[in-house]
């Protein structure tokens, strides 16, 4: 097996999981009520694992774009990608409802 074959196999494996992971996240967590505590814990662990996969896929795609556009703009592409991911996670926490209409940050001391 040559280096070219190894690189092609690795690229195909990366393209597979980096395409599937972002599609599985919304499908697995969209408007679901976890139910009992054990089911909720298992669901939270699974959704967390899939979320990590989706974030890694997004960063991988940003790195590919950054590599193609070159050094000065590549850093900006990566910075914007990480910022968008952070804003998305923060907005998810802010809009997470606890109790009767109280937002997550509103109940924090």
Image (spheres, grey):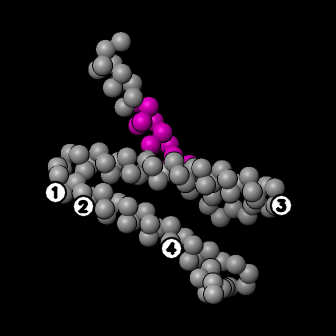
Mark 1–mark 4 Cα distance, whole angstroms, equals: 29 Å
User: Which residue occupies 31% across, 63% down?
Assistant: 80
Secondary structure character of the magenta stretch overall: helix
What secondary structure is marked by label 1?
helix
First of labels 1, 4 by sequence position? 1
Mark 2–mark 4 Cα distance, whole angstroms, equals: 22 Å
Q: Position of residue 36 (x, y in %)?
A: 83, 61
Q: Report if the CB atoms under discs 2 and 1 are less than 8 Å apart.
A: yes
First of labels 1, 3 by sequence position? 3
Q: Position of residue 4 (x, y in %)?
A: 29, 20
User: Which residue occupies 33% across, 19% down?
Assistant: 5
What residue did someone put label 1 on?
72
Mark 3–mark 4 Cα distance, whole angstroms, equals: 26 Å
First of labels 2, 4 by sequence position? 2
Work out whether residue 104 or residue 34 is closer to the camera in this orientation and state it.
Answer: 104
Disc marking residue 76: 2
First of labels 2, 3 by sequence position? 3
| In the image, farthest residue toward the top | 1
What secondary structure is marked by label 4?
helix
- Between tags 2 and 3, which lies in front? 2
Write down the region rendered in magenta. 12-24
What residue did someone put label 4 on?
91
What secondary structure is marked by label 2?
helix
What residue did someone put label 3 on?
36
Q: Is residue 84 magenta?
A: no
Q: Report if the CB atoms under discs 2 and 4 are less than 8 Å apart.
A: no
Mark 2–mark 3 Cα distance, whole angstroms, equals: 44 Å
92 displayed left or right of 2 = right
Mark 1–mark 3 Cα distance, whole angstroms, equals: 50 Å
- Between tags 2 and 4, which lies in front? 2
């Amino acid at each position: 097996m040559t280096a070219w074959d190894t690189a092609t196999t690795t690229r195909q494996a990366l393209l597979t999981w980096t395409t599937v992971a972002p599609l599985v996240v919304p499908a697995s967590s969209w408007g679901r009520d976890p139910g009992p505590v054990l089911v909720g814990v298992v669901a939270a662990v699974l959704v967390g694992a899939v979320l990590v996969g989706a974030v890694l896929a997004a960063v991988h795609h940003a790195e590919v774009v950054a590599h193609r556009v070159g050094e000065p703009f590549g850093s900006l592409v990566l910075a914007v990608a990480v910022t968008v991911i952070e804003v998305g996670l923060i907005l998810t926490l802010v809009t997470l409802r606890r109790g009767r209409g109280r937002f997550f940050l509103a109940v924090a001391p």
